[in-house]
Image (tube, helix red, strand yellow):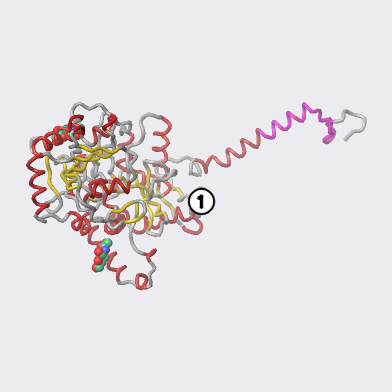
Amino acid sequence: MRNGGGRHNIKVSGTIMTPARAFVACAIILICLFYALTAAFQGLISGTQGPASSGTRLHLNGLDPRVNKQERDVSALLLPTRERWHGPVDLDVAAAARADELNRTWMESPDKAAGSWWLQPGFHLSFMEENPPYPFQRIKHVDGKDTGVIAIIAPFYDLDYYKGELARAFFWRLKANGHIVIIITSYQEFPGRIENPYDDRHTTPQDRLIHEAVDGYVHCFREPDRFIPPGIPRILLSESDFHDPDRRDGGGSLVPFGLPKEYDLFYSNQGGDWNDFARNWTLAKASFKRLITELGIKVIIMGRDLNKEEDHDLSPLIASGHIVTHGPSTPWKDFLRYIESSRILMAPNVHDASPRVLVEGLSLNLPILVNRHIIGGWKYVNDQTGAFFDSEENVVPVFKELLRKQQQSELRPREWFRENWGKEKATVRLQAFLELAVGEERLKAAQDIVKAKVTYK
Ligand SMILES: *[C@@H]1O[C@H](CO)[C@@H](O)[C@H](O)[C@H]1NC(C)=O
Ligand SMILES: *[C@@H]1O[C@H](CO)[C@@H](O)[C@H](O)[C@H]1NC(C)=O
């Protein structure tokens, strides 16, 4: 400080620092600092040390390569899966055998005897979370721990450029990091072309690259080649298979209470153009009119309060009491009670991928009357569980025959579902499928990424 000078002037090695000079100096220092930091972080931000050309070998993020010696050739992981996978495409039989093996090992293990349920095999689908956002869904172990396996369950969103691009970039980033990404086909024709004209999710040509680079398909299709790119391991397994037919808690019960039957036919449709298409409202209405006119049955429609809608087709039948409706705000536990109070569940749906309501119906021991052309969920229909129809011309005889079989105790929908699908079986089958499709080593590496909880080394 110089006593005789301006109060704020500072002398730095012989130069007088006026406030203006000090400001300029600070600005220069800040700019230099900014560039130095940017340069230092650039490599980390792009996930590479140096430009990422094809063949660049990357360290798995989150894992310290000095400890783990894990290096990945990122270009290999980002290639279409058919270039890495040389085994059979349909892994249903092999996965079922591996699932039995996993179950047998568990049943005989001392861990089971000791009651350590959290060591039980099985991969579960997580509930929807803020992150990663829909349509990404994490896959977890029975104890709730992340497996590092992520599912894509619907096409990316069309109507917001950044939202769609964020999702695409996120996919490639996860792949480069060593995550395992699969597609679960629970959204109409996805990954095929979406037919619903009211949908705001579609797939673009870039998405085809993503569909070819996923590690496997958990699908619902009768003819998977129509919807799934070739050469990628796949299994017939759906989100709806993961429901627990023995669930009974405050949220609702999939175990029948033994309620008396009040309705002959149950149908669910939340309303709006999108649902009307997915749940085939046109065929539903035509079928109700036929069934009520010819058989005088009582129908319950859940999800839309038709008393508030002007509907020329159905208003007379609502007035006569043949159709009862309940709005979308019905709690799930009551929704399930209405199912149980019905004799048969109808799904005229075509553009729908294994609707959950089919499993709710089967669990509550209702036979299911399903459109023959449904995309997914057809696998639940057999001579013990229900029947197919495909128009208002054959709905009446098919319904009558199903009712006859039910009255003569020839059907066992709940038992059949419990014996073949449901949470226990689905979770072990998913783990078995992944072990075969990507190998235990990559599964372990994917889990290590989320365990390490570090993005950048
Ligand atoms: C409804 O079902 C009929 C008969 O199976 C079918 O021809 C029609 O395409 C379906 N409509 C929709 C929107 O799914
Ligand atoms: C595991 O095996 C036991 C006994 O053999 C059987 O009761 C159970 O259903 C099996 N569980 C699965 C998921 O296959």
Residue 64 within the segment the image draws in magenta: no
Relative placement, left or right, of 8 versus 155 is right
Where residue 220 sits in the image (x, y, percent)?
Answer: 23, 46
Residue in the image at 19% along x and 49% along y? 261
Picture residue at 61% right of the left edge, 35% below the top: 35
Q: Which of the image's four quarters has the N terminus?
A: top right
Residue at 12% over, 44% down: 388
Q: Tell me if residue 43 comes above or below residue 237 in the rendering.
A: above
Q: Is residue 396 above or below residue 250?
A: above
Q: Is residue 181 visible?
A: yes
Q: Is residue 28 magenta?
A: yes
Location of residue 19 by image quarter: top right
Q: Nearer the viewer, residue 63 or 254?
A: 254
* Residue of label 1: 454
* Left or right: 90, with 446 as reference point: left
| Residue range highlighted in magenta | 8-30
On the image, which quarter does residue 322 sit in? top left
Residue type highlighted by circle 1: Val
Residue 437 position within the rendered picture, expressed as x and y whole percent measured from the top left: 29, 53
Residue at x-position 56% and y-position 41%: 41
SS type, badge 1: loop
Residue furthest toward the right?
A: 4
